[in-house]
Amino acid sequence: MPFNEEQQKQMQAEQEQIRERIKQVKHRILVLSGKGGVGKSTVAANLAISLSLEGKKVGLLDIDIHGPSIPKILNLKGKAIQATGGVILPITMAENLKVMSIGFLLRTDNDAVIWRGPMKYQMIKQFLKDVDWGNLDFLIVDSPPGTGDEPLSIVQLLENADGAIIVTTPQEVALSDVRKCITFCEQLHLPVIGVLENMSGFVCPGCGQRTDIFKSGGGQQMAEQMKVPFLGRVPIDPQVVQACDSGRPYIQYYSSSQAAKAFKEAMAPLLKFN
Ligand code: ADP
């Protein structure tokens, strides 16, 4: 059904409000994945922390409506957010790290599952329009997985985002969805900053032997085929799970681990942004 004149005017006004809000953000980065469970939120959280530890002013926005896991990963579950005069204030985790998650607004973890498309769209729009980040170097957006309506809305509402980091695991079932994700970015003229292969091999802490549980190297091959940059491999590390479950930022607590180093390396292209 086409929008009437009034609706169109309102949409334009809202888009203008989003533009105004986002003007204070130098770089907007989306973290995407072809499917859920590949570590997208883990990557988004660790990238944001990593950038903030480098002295950048960072906002982490979690709009993964079906599984907002940032509050859990960063031990912010149950935090009340403040909203005054149509402005929502993000939670300040550290001097230069602010966080906002759709999870803060849901009463239960099951809330959003039953939402219809237009409600999700409204929620995403409200977040982009009303959250007052102040001046930021980077806004890292943890987007819902896949290439459906929700990631599409975000890319369109954000307008001219700097690019996307696409997270995958190495096995073929995950990779075929990533190819769709890259095509999605191309169609929307969203630059692909690179593909990060997560859960890539496991080194036994006891005997040191490496096992490629989900295979390894598939992400790199696929990135070469699709002519997009490859950001590296993050191995499986049980401490990532422990850190995520207990809300301790992995990259900070286990900074010398192989996975933490891989997360940091993946951030390198972002540090080159002016
Ligand atoms: P997504 O956002 O793609 O749904 P999550 O970031 O929530 O995925 O991660 C799913 C699960 O996988 C979490 O329990 C997380 O701790 C775990 N995980 C993510 N990356 C790794 C890794 N490199 N090693 C071990 N576990 C990981």
Image: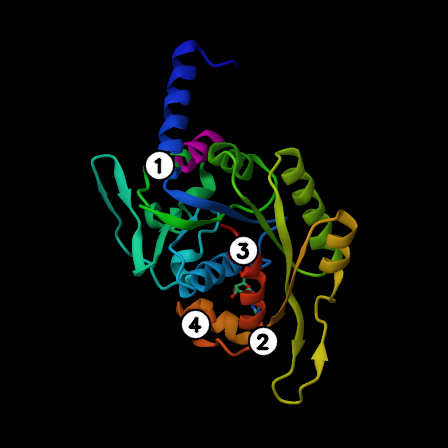
Tell me whether the residue at label 2 lies in contact with that at label 1, contact meaning CB atoms closer than 8 angstroms: no
Q: Amino acid at mark 1?
A: Arg
Marks 4/1: CA–CA distance: 30 Å
Q: Amino acid at mark 4?
A: Gln
Which of the pair 190/79 is nearer the observer?
A: 190
Residue 21 numbered tag? 1
* Image coords of residue 254 (percent x, y): 48, 77
Instruction: Tell which tag, 2 or 3, sits nearer the viewer.
Output: 3
Q: Which residue is mark 4?
A: 252
Tell me whether the residue at label 1 lies in contact with that at label 3, contact meaning CB atoms closer than 8 angstroms: no
- Per the image, label 3 sits on a secondary structure element best described as loop
- Per the image, label 4 sits on a secondary structure element best described as helix
Mark with earlier residue (4, 1): 1
Instruction: Tell which tag, 3 or 4, sits nearer the viewer.
Output: 3
Marks 4/2: CA–CA distance: 13 Å
Q: Residue at position x 79%, y 50% from top? A: 225
- Per the image, label 2 sits on a secondary structure element best described as helix
Mark with earlier residue (2, 1): 1
Tell me, yes or no, whether the highlighted magenta stretch contains residue 145.
Answer: no
Q: Which residue is mark 2?
A: 258
Q: Residue at position x 74%, y 48% from top? A: 227
Mark with earlier residue (4, 2): 4
